[in-house]
Image (cartoon, rainbow, N blue to C red):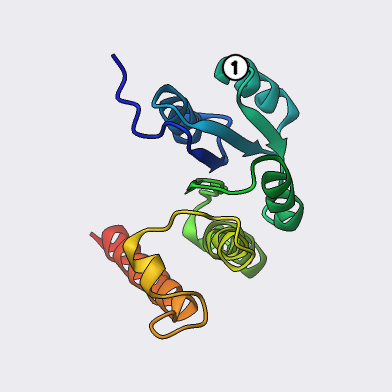
Amino acid sequence: MAHNRFDGRIALVTGGTSGMGLATARRLRDEGARVIVTGRDPARLAAAAQELGPEALTIAAETTDLDALFDTIRNRYGRLDVLFVNAGIGFFPPTDAVTEADFDRVVGVNIKGVFFTIQPGLVRGVVHHRSGPARRRRLGGPGSGRGNLTSRSAVVTAERGRALLQD
């Protein structure tokens, strides 16, 4: 018997048409959530819709079109309880082949995209339930230096990656 801890919850999984995103959407659905999945590939969106069933909503969306996404969620459901930000891109050339444009594209989607996916949901009041830290620190309030925290995390991760490559 499934544990239905997400009964009645509205859950958005970005990048939810394959891999970890689809597995998360499946699990949320199995635990009672009404699931919304975003992706870019029409064939994968159709396959995810088929797999997740008629209660699931699949939406073609880019990280550059978040206003329309959150408007759709607000108009259809009135709120969002769970936000699983999984959309991203992979790019794995040799280090000496990476251009600044390549780097900017990956950072733009995988780092900035996460922040700017979370931001409209909070600022526009679509996200209904928040974690403890998110409740204590609203965007723009004390302790909300998320841009600084994100950039520092990126630097730490890059340094760890560099160290691994040297070993």
At mark 1, the secondary structure is loop
Which residue is under mark 1? 53
Where residue 125 appears, as percent x and y from the top left, is 60, 62
95 vs 74: above or below: below
Residue 117: image quadrant is: bottom right
Three-letter amino acid code of the residue under disc 1: Gly
Q: Quadrant of residue 31?
A: top left
Q: Nearer the viewer, residue 8 or 43?
A: 8
Query: Relative to 68, is 166 above or below?
Result: below
- From the viewer's perspective, tell me whether residue 130 is left or right of residue 90: left
User: In percent of the image, x 35 and y 65: which residue is there?
Assistant: 157
Query: Can see residue 159?
Result: yes
Q: Residue at x 54, y 29 (%)?
A: 18
Characterize the local packing of mark 1: few (<14), some (14-19) or many (20 or more) Cα atoms within 10 angstroms: few
Query: Residue at point 75% right, 54% down?
Result: 65
Measured from the top left, where is residue 47 in percent x and y?
Answer: 64, 19
Please identify the quadrant where the C terminus is shown: bottom left
